[in-house]
Amino acid sequence: MQKNSRTAVAERAPSRYIVTLSFALTLAAFAASIGSNSSLIRTHLSLANEIPAAGDFDQDLAQKYFLLPAVPVDSDAAAPAPAVDDAPSLATADSLGEAPIEQIIQVQKGDTLMSVLADAGIKLDEAHAAIAALSDVFSPKQLMPGQPIKLTLAPADQGSGESEGAGQPQLQLVSLSLQPSVERNVELTRGIDGVFTAQSTNVPLHRDIARAAGTIQSSLFEAGQSDGVPIEVMNEIIHAFSYDVDFQREIQAGDSYEILYERFADDQGRLAKTGNILYASLTLGGRTLALYHYTLPDGRTDWFNPKGNSVRKALLRTPIDGAKITSGFGMRMHPILGYSLMHKGVDFGAPIGTPIYAAGDGVVQIIGPVTGYGNYIRLKHTATYGTAYGHISRFAAGLHVGSRVHQGQVIAYVGMTGRATGPHLHYEVLVNGKQINPQSVKLPTGEKLAGKELKSFLAYAANIDRQRGDLAQGNAVATSQ
């Protein structure tokens, strides 16, 4: 048994020797075959250092680092074109060359010009220089949300070694442009010496005369707005008619209006601004009130009726905007005292803080708290006329007894001081020291034109009427500025 075992081992030994010898000879042959090309050995030894981390492979790396089945290679065949991104990154500056890059950035709420430039990749010191130059013609504080800014950028010279991060070339500002308004352009440019220069240019505007006319359903303001009349035009019209019209009680559904005003637009027809209002009329219950905006030789501009009389009165009937009459002049049951009492003024309901205007030019006679009225102010306008204002929350700064005020000047603000159940203005008109009804008193008129001035005004009014007729018939009336 032992003899047979030794025989078996002896028989296997030559086999192991032959295998070992064969492997050694093969290894020696392999070493000899590559001995003449040491670079190949170095390449294979450094292979582990070249293999990228997982996730970094693309098709080219796969061909480089993975053994693929041997296939016939056509040495003349073109290499496959690399994949191209839909939008090249700013980092690929070499591929873009020196071509400028244009960006249009819309200002967001909370943005500053500095933050806009920094987000675009511009160095802070360069952004400061750009803003300093731009400030000569435009205040960065005037930036408004939604405003577009056009930036032209170019890769900066990388020789300086300044870079925000690996592979991200620094950008420099070539130019900046924005349009603060329809009638104005602002542009910043970079000179060859790197110095920024800013300039502001006016956009050519075209002047034309616009006509608006329509029927009033609820209020004059709403009628004008529905017909596209700018708010500033409507506000001026309402103020002009407020001397003669009680907008709370005299305006009825079916009444009508007509307005002629200057309109300035750019080449695309976009409204840049409105100019003078030339004419306005209200037809109330069949009665037409017409006003012409006329400039006097001394430069003053005022509203005149067709006879050349100024509509400006010595006193305003309504010294507050947008208020409703909550209590009229006369006997009434007092809401606090609980018995009938003469109400010697007109109450205008309005929110606390609503501005109160001086009804006319005058001097402050009384200012301060008065029993029942709360905070109170009285103005003397002429030897005959005076006005008083009660339940005020606060007075305009700087007013005191003896202060001079002008018609339309803010003198106080609505409140509910004194005996008041809600915020409102108590307004009185006094004639020789006695309260009278502000809604019925015949107020003294303003200036009346005469002589050559009246003749000049009548010629002006006739020209306006011709323009009204042309516009009403659809004929354009326009002139360039």
Image (tube, rainbow, N blue to C red):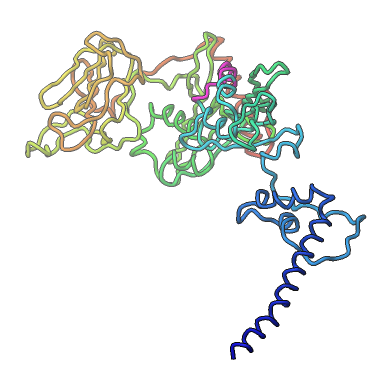
Report whether residue 263 is seen: no
Q: Is residue 2 left or right of residue 444?
A: right
Q: Is residue 5 left or right of residue 227?
A: right
**Residue 418: % across, % down:** 13, 29
Name the one closer to the observer, 237 or 8: 8
Q: Is residue 140 shown in magenta? A: yes
Magenta-highlighted residues: 130-141
Instruction: Identify the residue shown where x is 48% and y is 22%.
Output: 303
Q: Is residue 309 above or below residue 281?
A: above
Q: Which image quadrant: the N terminus?
A: bottom right
Q: Residue furthest bottom?
A: 1
Q: Is residue 206 left or right of residue 331?
A: right
**Residue 51: % across, % down:** 66, 52
Instruction: Identify the residue shown where x is 67% and y is 43%.
Output: 89
Instruction: Identify the residue shown where x is 64% and y is 30%.
Output: 170
Q: Is residue 338 shown in magenta? A: no
Q: Residue furthest right?
A: 76
Name the one closer to the observer, 438 or 141: 141
Using the rendered view, name the quadrant where residue 426 is placed. top left
